[in-house]
Amino acid sequence: MRNSLINNLIQFNDNRGNAFLLVGDLGYSVVEEFCEKHPDNFINVGVAEQNMAGIAAGIASEGFHVFCYSIGNFNTFRCAEQIRNDIDYHNLPVCTVSVGGGVAYGNMGYSHHAIQDMALMRTLPNTTIYAPVDANEASACFDAIINSKSPSYLRLHKAGEPRITESDSNITPGIPLYASGNRLSKRLLLTTGFCGQGAFNLVNSNTELCHYTLPAWGLRHKNYLPTFAEKYDEIIVIEDHLLDAGFCSWVLECLIGTKHISKIRSKAIKTEGIGLVGSEDYLHHASQLFDIMRD
């Protein structure tokens, strides 16, 4: 996914030249090509995420679309005040790009486990969450982000994700996209981000399931989901994030006041797993993330 982002940034600047990339002293082996081709649109601000957010706001106010690239929690929690006050409040076209969403950096421990990031970023009223499942959705997310004049949060995995979605998908915030399975099924798996890969595998082994991804959503995009939910008897929401204030919480908020709220089941990272260190697969297994027969 991160390679898809950089490739899209290069192509965009080759044609129009008004995207800017900031990094917090990382991204090596990924960002160099952009830096070499567009050195005037690139700054490594160092390990200074609060400063990076402030710089991004200033550059965006001069007509650039700015991308702030870092790992998981670093460019969200470390600079939450600057994102809130400098970027979101002024509704500036800054995309906060987090690599390693969920527990992609499982062996690095809790400091690198981005399992509360969506809870933070989705409270910002002008910010849209973008969480692609594969490189195809990542490219479609880039198109949607670059055509928006508002802040965004792009939650990426890392690299090497299988492509499970159509390459020509158009993304509209708040509207789910069909991924796989029986379209006539009344039992739905709904995911955002990389954990959709696990849902895709579940559907391949169970023909009674249907899987949709929701790669873009936020506070301003709640109107469509009640209509979408009418088609299903059960909706299992899977997220590589803590249950509290995450994607499923957003789904439930969309359905407040409707009869559909009782259809929702959640599979999320368990709080008991905080502090565990291991591979991403191990941490998903510890939370029984894809064991839909439980809970």
Image: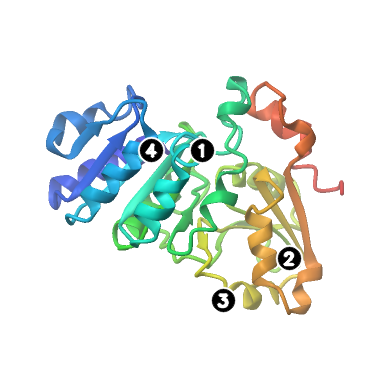
Residue type, numbered disc 4: Gln
Image marks 4 and 3: residues in contact by CB distance under 8 Å: no
Image spot of residue 129 (x, y percent)? 48, 55
Rounded to the nearest whole Å, what is the CA distance between mark 1 and mark 3? 31 Å
Numbered disc in front, either 1 or 3: 3
Classify residue 4 by image quadrant. top left
Residue annotated with mark 1: 162
Q: Earlier in the sequence, mark 2 or mark 3?
A: 2
Residue annotated with mark 3: 223
Residue annotated with mark 4: 50
Q: Residue at x 34, y 43 (%)?
A: 53
Image spot of residue 18 (x, y percent)? 17, 51
Q: Earlier in the sequence, mark 1 or mark 2?
A: 1
Q: Earlier in the sequence, mark 1 or mark 3?
A: 1
Image spot of residue 227 (x, y percent)? 63, 78
Label 1: state its secondary structure. Answer: loop
Q: Nearer the viewer, residue 87 or 217?
A: 87
**Please, is residue 260 above or below residue 37 in the view?**
below
